[in-house]
Image: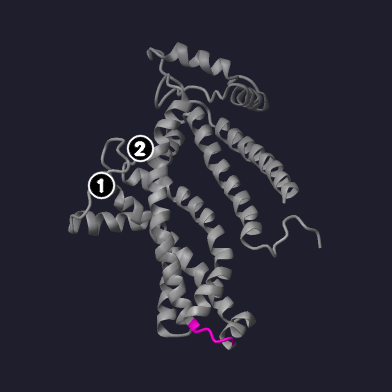
Amino acid sequence: MFKYAVQRILYMLLVFLIITAICFTLIRLLPPEELPPEDIHRVVVEARREAAGYNKPIPVQFGIFLRDVVTRFDWGVSDKLYFGQEVADIFMDKLPASMVVNFYSIILSIPFGIALGIFAALKKNTWIDYTISTATMVVISVPSFVYAFLIQYVLCYKLGWFPFLMKAGTDWFSWPMFVSMMPAILSLSFGVIAGFTRTTRAELTEVLTSEFMLLARTKGLTKAQATVRHAMRNCMVVVLPAIFGEFIGILGGSLIIEKIFSIPGVGGLTINAINGRDYPIFMMTTCFYVAIGLVAGIVVDISYGFIDPRIRMGSKK
């Protein structure tokens, strides 16, 4: 297990470096925005760009970028969106909003998704199963921003249950803040609930028809007892690690959702950095999303070994 974990971490670092290099190259291929001569910040910005090697070949620029990040954790300063501010400070200021919204979304999605999946599996080949399965496929196929517009129109405009935009402030766990975040939470949750429903139904359906379930029934257990004691335990081998994958999906969807609901998070910061060609901010937010995705993949792989002892990590057949 330890050897496998080390191999996966080294592989993750290599993949992280490659993806970072690709993103860095693509963003630097775009010409930096020229400041007008009368701009009072022109001299300062040009000096910073010179220090970052903007007039040098892209491989040299990437080397300077890696050196500053690795040795000093220096991601540079914003030269447009937040002129003169440290990128790391800007990022840390935006991170809590994104994490809280995504946390609420995954917490809401897990019980609903698993419960619907269990219900569909227990009602296999009935109209209930067909209805849930069809609805699941439809919901998964619709982007999260479509739900955002529908929620804004129905729940915010027509019914007036929630505000259109997120409440200002940093009291993340207060009730008024939670209510103001509900439209964004619901927008992100629909697809995740459908994902958990599909995964749970597929795994539980397979487990319920396995031989050990027949053995459990012959020993006198009722269907409910056999399902709770044996089927659910084996089903969770796949469902629990899927939580990390769904969390990554929520993070990706929040890029647009944060803009729609004016959430001051990392997603909106990334979109603004792309539109404004603020290279330092774009690189830090991109590295954040890449790192989260790669770490989640490792956690999922390793967690299988702890949840199911039959799985042998890194073994060669």
Please name which of the two marks, 2 or 1, marks the residue nearer to the observer: 1
Could you say which is closer to the camera, residue 213 or residue 293?
Answer: 213
Residue 150: x and y, percent?
A: 29, 58
Q: Is residue 96 visible?
A: yes
Q: Which residues, given as a range, are shown in magenta? A: 219-223
Q: Please report contact status of discs 2 and 1: CB closer than 8 Å, yes or no.
A: no
Type of amino acid under label 2 = Pro
- The correct choice, above or below, for 269 with respect to 210 in the image is above
Residue holding disc 2: 264
Residue 118: x and y, percent?
A: 46, 73
Query: Mark 1: which secondary structure?
Result: helix
Type of amino acid under label 1 = Trp
Could you say which is closer to the camera, residue 81 or residue 180?
Answer: 180
Residue holding disc 1: 175
In reply to whether residue 222 is colored magenta, the answer given is yes
Kindly report the secondary structure that dominates the magenta region of the rendered protein. Answer: loop
Q: Residue at x 52, y 13 (%)?
A: 47
Q: Residues within 10 Å of mark 1 (few under 14, many from 20)?
A: few
Residue reaching furthest front? 220
Left or right of 55: which side holds 168? left
In reply to whether residue 106 is colored magenta, the answer given is no
Q: Quadrant of residue 238?
A: bottom right
